[in-house]
Image: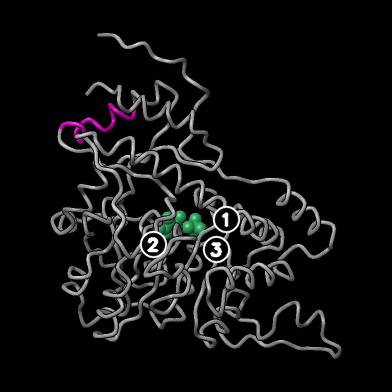
Amino acid sequence: MTTLLKPAPAMIPVARPYIGEEEERGVLDVLRSGWVTQGPRVAEFEAKFAEYVGCEHAIAVSSCTTALQLSLIVSGIGPGDEVICPSLSFIATANAIACIGATPVFVDIDLSTYNLDPAAVEAHISTRTKAILAVHQIGLSAELNTLHLVAAKHGLKLIEDAACAIGSEYDGQLIGRPVGDIACFSFHPRKIMTTGEGGMITTRDADLAERLRRLRQHAMSMSDVTRHNAKQIAIETYDEIGFNFRMTDMQAAVGIAQLGRLDSMLDKRRSLAQRYSNALEHLSWLRVPYVPENCRHNYQSYMVLLIGEAAAQRDHIMQRLLERNISTRRAIMAIHREAPYRSASWEDSLPQTSLVTDTGMILPLFHQMTEEDQDYVIEAIHEVQL
Ligand SMILES: *Cc1c(COP(=O)(O)O)cnc(C)c1O
């Protein structure tokens, strides 16, 4: 049987940043102001971000990876320590742990949410464990209350890799007012809001915030803005070894404009995600995302899990869709399969992680996607011959 296929539209990408004139104007203003690196626009972005997520302190940095690295350092973690994290995540989660000399311990996920399984976390705590690094998987919040209880019971820090989770909610609260100690966000263009590159750390702890601000800037005892505005000469000190993890004012100007668009971007994603779920949930060969009652998803990615014969044919399905100008991506990666972390024993202890990374498929979802484009994708999925 042949089906009459509609003509393919231009390539439908899996994601695309949404950037407009406000961002352009913001960058131009910064360029003309004479202050281009971390300065007044970074401070303004931090204040607005903190207010948006409802947290006392927000510290802008160069990426989520450097945000995670600094967060682990100010949590007192270093060589010889173990940090529990999922393997089902972008590799930066584990790299942030490894690059400060600590050891990532990969724990399996709950198959319904793709997030860390708190019972498995507890089972992997050793005398060397110092922290839990919980990822909010493609935007859906991890089971924070249970993880917090486990962390408190064993005297561990709880750090949230919220790279993908801006706008997501847990128990009626936006992610970013940490249930544990610290949350880290990414503004890479693959996330919902972007500054090109960039990251943000949020915490309720004033002392942690203060140290984070110093460490991102060579551990300098005062900020450039303070020194610049000082009426008397000001000589700074450097009391520990720091980093250059600064965000620039050009990036912050983009971030401020993106924050202004965030609610509309979230609305659009949620509405497109609902349309996908409504149209696809009856298909027996895939599973649409599940969202627990106490969570609100931002759909940073819309991932379906392929089931049965379709699971074994994922590459074939992705290829058929690509031939119709629809770009998809394999699921979230499994870090334990990459060279720096590879070991046979991980594979045995992470069955759910392996299942999801092998059978998940991410569908196109971006702000400018029209319902017509989405209907075309939905139709193409229905027409895929296994
Ligand atoms: C994107 C991502 C990161 C890395 O963010 P960068 O800003 O690119 O450093 C870390 N963790 C997760 C879960 C991510 O999705």
> Mark 2 = which residue?
93
233 vs 352: above or below: below
Across and down, in percent, residue 221 comes to 66, 86
Across and down, in percent, residue 324 comes to 41, 21
State the separation of the CA atoms marked 1 and 3: 16 Å
Query: Residue drawn 16% across and 73% down?
Result: 123
> Mark 3 = which residue?
199
Query: Residue drawn 70% across and 80% down?
Result: 223
Ligand 1 within 8 Å of disc 3? The answer is yes
Task: Mark yes or no: residue 94 visible.
Answer: no
Amino acid type at circle 2 is Thr
Quadrant location of residue 87? bottom left
The magenta span reads 309-318
199 vs 202: above or below: above
> Regarding mark 3 in the picture, which secondary structure is present there?
strand
Question: Within 10 angstroms of label 2, few (less than 14), some, or many (20 or more) residues?
Answer: many
Across and down, in percent, residue 351 comes to 16, 53
Task: Determine whether label 1 and label 3 are within 8 Å by CB.
Answer: no
Q: Main secondary structure of the magenta part?
A: helix
Q: Nearer the viewer, mark 2 or mark 1?
A: 1
Whether the magenta-drawn stretch holds residue 317 is answered as: yes
State the separation of the CA atoms marked 2 and 1: 24 Å
> Mark 1 = which residue?
262
**Most distant residue in the top direction:** 1
Across and down, in percent, residue 273 comes to 41, 44
Amino acid type at circle 1 is Leu
> Regarding mark 1 in the picture, which secondary structure is present there?
helix
Relative side of 318 to 163, left or right: left
Query: Residue drawn 53% across and 69% down?
Result: 53
Whether the magenta-drawn stretch holds residue 244 is answered as: no
